[in-house]
Amino acid sequence: MKTNAELRKQELPPPRPTATGPGRLGHAWGRGPDAPWGGAAGSGRASSGEPRERKMAPCGRGSLTILVRWAAALFLALGVERALALPEICTQCPGSVQNLSKVALYCKTTRELMLHARCCLNQNGTILGLDLQNCSLEDPGPDFHQAYTTIIIDLQANPLKGDLANTFRGFTQLQTLILPQDVNCPGGINAWNTITSYIDNQICQGQKNLCNNTGNPEMCPENGSCVPDGPGFLQCVCADGFHGYKCMRQGSFSLLMFFGILGSTTLSISILLWGTQRRKAKTS
């Protein structure tokens, strides 16, 4: 026979399962085969057996922050690359453009232009203004032709020496040129609308088109046309389909014939020199 203690122990219900640790799911006591699983995270308490909807942490704000950081890094990299890609003429002289200079005023009053070092650039990086005043320059330098697209150039307060006439060949868009007082405007009065002299500088304003001022329509050949080539310069350009001396040859220039003749001539001279040297070597 069983004792009273054993009978009371038999009548007690089985112990309910508890969570095994913080953050782990506790299962409902008495779950049948079709009963839903339930659980609470981190409480260590048993679930009531009812299904609960899972909620995900919002990630939109974090993703937006990451995108903003990537965009800022990209713009910074592009800015550094653009700064490194400045033409050499813009950094030939240390410092930046003075706020009251004519180049700075032109750049600030014209839309979509930016000042970088000594240059005024458009959005494509084309130089439209160049300020090299007070740079101790005796000549504009070998990189000066990088600024052939400029509209305004300031070279005052420099000890420039020599004739600058050929320096501005190809500067067809130049309209304002500021030079030291003792330096003449390239091309002289025939190349500019106005030349104004001041105590410390000289301003050449309004480049003339010499093709309209020559008064000699026969200056260029029949199959050529006159085009300006900078202050005081012009050139004759052959019409389409013409080339050679005075644009008298019609048709495209034959590169194959030119290089064929050049190659055969070079080969003949080389063979002749080789034979001459061989003969001298045998006689000696």
Image: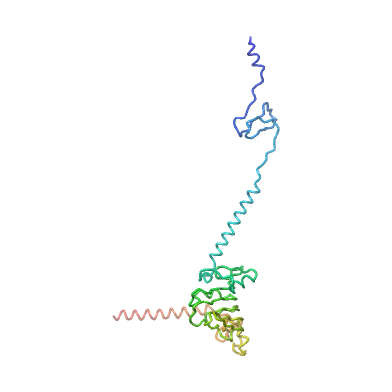
Residue 188 quadrant: bottom right
Res. 165 in view: no
Q: Nearer the viewer, residue 10 or 21?
A: 21
Q: Residue furthest front?
A: 199
Residue 171: x %, y % from top left? 57, 78
Up-down relation of residue 57 to residue 271 (above or below): above
Total residue callouts? 0
The one of 95 and 69 positioned closer to us in this rendering: 95
Residue 2 vertical placement versus 218 (above, below): above
233 relative to 11 in the view: left or right: left
Q: x, y (%) of residue 134? A: 52, 74
Residue at x-position 64% and y-position 23%: 15
* Front-most of residues 157 and 26: 157
Answer yes or no: is residue 90 visible: yes
The residue positioned farthest toward the left in the image shown: 284
Look at the image and name its color scheme: rainbow
- Image coordinates for residue 66, horizontal then vertical, percent: 61, 51
Rendered-image quadrant of the C terminus:
bottom left
Name the quadrant of the N terminus: top right
Q: Position of residue 195 (x, y in %)?
A: 59, 83
Find residue 249 and report its image quarter. Answer: bottom right
